[in-house]
Image: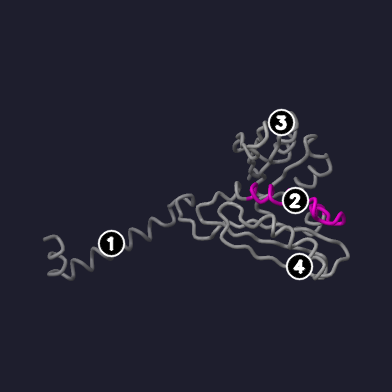
């Protein structure tokens, strides 16, 4: 039998094994990154600032309501959070390996929007602070109002320069306008597709994904 050949000829078996190992070692540098298996589960982070609050207040007023809203989002494996005495709440959600990170980010954004009414009015968006601090962002999920981005907010997003932007919109006119501004700001549109995020309503959301041009 075929197996018996290698059992009776250990030198031949060793040579064949060495050839296979060398072929694999030569192929690895030439393998496209897209072919590599996913080994790190996708994560989505939510950051909020409650100015002047201590860690206990941040935990009670910001972190806990957000965790309650996010918990159970599709594909979630586990969630971790921290609340600091500087008023910063950070929540990191880890998803299954098979979960698309951009769709996961949109799902988390929708859950966060549901909790906004329960947060103190002093909780503010931190985009300008992130720009000033030079924070690097992989994916930014945006869900502006029907009127679209305010020019200053859009400018801050472009200055933040995330590698990818996921834009959620229910207004085709402002979607087209803001995508045009993002393209002029150094991004290219990868795809735009309709998504029925709220089946109980009659309108359909549109989701666009953009990538920073190299």
Q: Residues within 10 Å of mark 2 (few under 14, many from 20)?
A: many
Judge the density around disc 4: few (<14), some (14-19), many (≥20) Cα neighbours within 10 Å.
many
- In the image, taking residue 177 as reference, residue 30 lies left or right, namely left
Q: What distance separates the C-alpha of mark 4 from that of mark 2?
A: 24 Å
Front residue (pair 102, 170): 170
Q: Where does the image place residue 164, in percent across and percent down from the top left?
A: 65, 47
Task: Compare marks 3 and 1 and give the one earlier in the sequence.
Answer: 1
Quarter residue 52 falls in: bottom right
Secondary structure state at the residue bearing disc 2: helix
Q: Residue furthest top?
A: 173
- Mark 4 sits on what residue? 83
Measure the alpha-carbon separation of dots 2 and 1. 48 Å
Query: In this figure, which residue is indicated by the disc labeled 1?
Result: 19
Give whichever of discs 4 and 2 has the lower sequence position. 4
Residue wearing tag 3: 176
* Residue 80 versus residue 137 in the image, above or below: below
Q: Earlier in the sequence, mark 1 or mark 4?
A: 1
**Who's the residue at 82% across and 65% down the image?**
87
Question: Is 171 inside the magenta-drawn segment?
Answer: no
- Which one is closest to the eye, mark 3 or mark 4? 4
Magenta part of the chain: 105-128
Kindly identify which residue carries mark 2.
Answer: 160
| Prevailing secondary structure of the magenta residues | helix
Going from N to C along the chain, the mark reached first, 2 or 1, is 1
Front one among 149 and 155:
149
């Amino acid at each position: 039998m075929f197996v018996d050949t290698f059992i009776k000829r250990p030198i031949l078996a060793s040579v064949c094994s060495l050839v296979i190992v060398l072929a694999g070692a030569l192929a690895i540098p030439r393998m496209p990154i897209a072919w590599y298996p996913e080994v790190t589960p996708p994560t989505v982070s939510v950051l909020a600032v409650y100015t002047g609050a201590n860690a206990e207040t941040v935990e009670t007023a910001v972190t806990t309501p957000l965790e309650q809203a996010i918990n159970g989002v599709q594909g979630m494996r586990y969630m971790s959070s921290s609340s600091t005495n500087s008023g910063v709440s950070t929540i990191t959600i880890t998803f299954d390996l098979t979960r698309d990170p951009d769709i996961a980010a949109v799902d988390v954004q929708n859950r966060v929007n549901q909790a906004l009414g329960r947060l103190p009015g002093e909780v503010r968006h931190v985009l300008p602070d992130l720009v000033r601090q030079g924070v690097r962002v992989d994916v930014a999920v945006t869900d502006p109002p029907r009127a679209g981005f305010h020019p200053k907010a859009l400018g801050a997003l472009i200055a933040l320069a995330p590698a990818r932007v996921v834009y959620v919109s229910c207004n085709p006119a402002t979607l087209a306008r803001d995508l045009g501004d993002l393209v002029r700001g150094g991004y290219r549109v990868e795809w735009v597709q309709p998504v029925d995020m709220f089946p109980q309503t009659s309108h359909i959301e549109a989701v666009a994904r953009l990538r920073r041009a190299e």
